Image (cartoon, grey):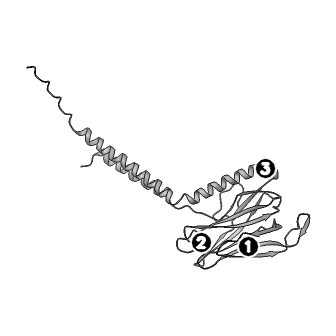
């Protein structure tokens, strides 16, 4: 019959394992722009990172809308193998200049469409690079984004952040802009954010499974050790050997 100590150890093990599995469950991801910060008045190369959140459908199209209240004079896209890019242009909503000359046409939307076989599959992500500049004199740029899946679902990442509030349910990618004097600090913060984002994306698969397996194995070892100690403690001590008689 299992002792009270052994039963308590097994119950503790079960509760711990359940807590680990709940904690390790899939976290919600959303479309982001990386790095997270750039410098006002300068140029920046950013990547729109698009994770696939569906368990069965693939992402087939991404539409990124550039902010109309802060138009950008120059926008160029980086080729993505297997994806066709379309750029929609129009007159800026507010007058802007680039290199001392007025800009009469700006990019308003960029659309990437996947060729057959190049879709973003479940459990994977893709990055879409864009060069932007000169960046306007504003505190942030909000890029509202639509993500289309192969089953027809369209996820609208269009919620703008609210100062001092919680993150919205479907947040739009946001690029914070720092003053030129803060360029070095912005670069350091951007590098840290990018490293943390990459770590959360790449470490959540096999490495997490190995860590969980190691934790479970360690807990099982503690339980078995406790059982062995309980059994050994229950045995009567052996009588001391009688001293040899003198002949």
Q: Secondary structure at mark 1?
A: strand
Q: Is residue 24 visible?
A: no
**Residue drawn at the location 78% of the way across and 51% of the way down:** 183
The mark that comes first in sequence, 3 or 2, is 2
Crowdedness of circle 3 by 10 Å Cα count: few (<14), some, many (20+)? few
Report how far apart the C-alphas of labels 3 and 1 lie in the structure.
29 Å
Which residue, as the protein is rendered here, is positioned at the far left? 247
**Residue drawn at the location 39% of the way across and 53% of the way down:** 14
Q: As displayed, is residue 54 above or below residue 36?
A: below
- Where residue 150 appears, as percent x and y from the top left, is 59, 78
Residue at label 3?
A: 182
Residue at label 2?
A: 120
Which residue, as the protein is rendered here, is positioned at the far front? 247
Which residue, as the protein is rendered here, is positioned at the far top? 246
Crowdedness of circle 1 by 10 Å Cα count: few (<14), some, many (20+)? many
- Where residue 131 appears, as percent x and y from the top left, is 76, 65
Foreground pick, 17 / 99: 99
Residue at label 1?
A: 110
Report how far apart the C-alphas of labels 2 and 1 lie in the structure.
17 Å
Q: Secondary structure at mark 3?
A: helix
Residue 166 image label: none
- Where residue 215 appears, as percent x and y from the top left, is 43, 51
**Residue drawn at the location 72% of the way across and 62% of the way down:** 46
Foreground pick, 228 / 46: 46
The image quadrant that residue 132 belongs to is bottom right
Q: Quick check: marks 3 and 1 in contact, CB under 8 Å?
A: no
């Amino acid at each position: 019959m299992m002792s009270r100590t052994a039963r308590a150890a097994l119950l503790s093990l079960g509760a711990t394992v359940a807590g680990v599995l709940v904690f390790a469950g899939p976290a919600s991801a959303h479309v982001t722009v990386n790095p997270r910060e750039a410098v006002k008045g300068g140029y920046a190369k950013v990547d729109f990172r698009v994770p696939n959140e569906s368990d069965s459908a693939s992402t087939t199209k991404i539409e990124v809308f550039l902010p109309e209240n802060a138009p950008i004079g120059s926008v160029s896209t980086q080729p993505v193998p297997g994806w066709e890019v379309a750029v929609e242009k129009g007159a800026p909503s507010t007058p802007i200049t680039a290199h001392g000359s007025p800009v009469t046409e700006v990019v308003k939307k960029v659309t990437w469409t996947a060729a057959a076989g190049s879709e973003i599959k479940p459990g994977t992500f893709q990055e879409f690079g864009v060069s932007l500049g000169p960046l306007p004199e504003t505190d942030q740029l909000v890029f509202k984004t639509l993500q289309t899946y192969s089953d027809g679902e369209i996820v609208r990442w269009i919620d703008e952040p609210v100062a001092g509030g919680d993150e919205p349910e479907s947040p739009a990618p946001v690029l914070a802009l720092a003053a030129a004097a803060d360029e070095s600090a912005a670069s350091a913060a951007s590098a840290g954010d990018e490293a943390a984002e990459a770590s959360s994306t790449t470490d959540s698969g096999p490495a997490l499974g190995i860590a969980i397996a190691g934790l479970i194995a360690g807990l099982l070892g503690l339980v078995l050790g406790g059982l062995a100690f309980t059994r050994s403690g229950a045995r009567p001590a052996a009588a001391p050997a009688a001293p040899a008689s003198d002949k």
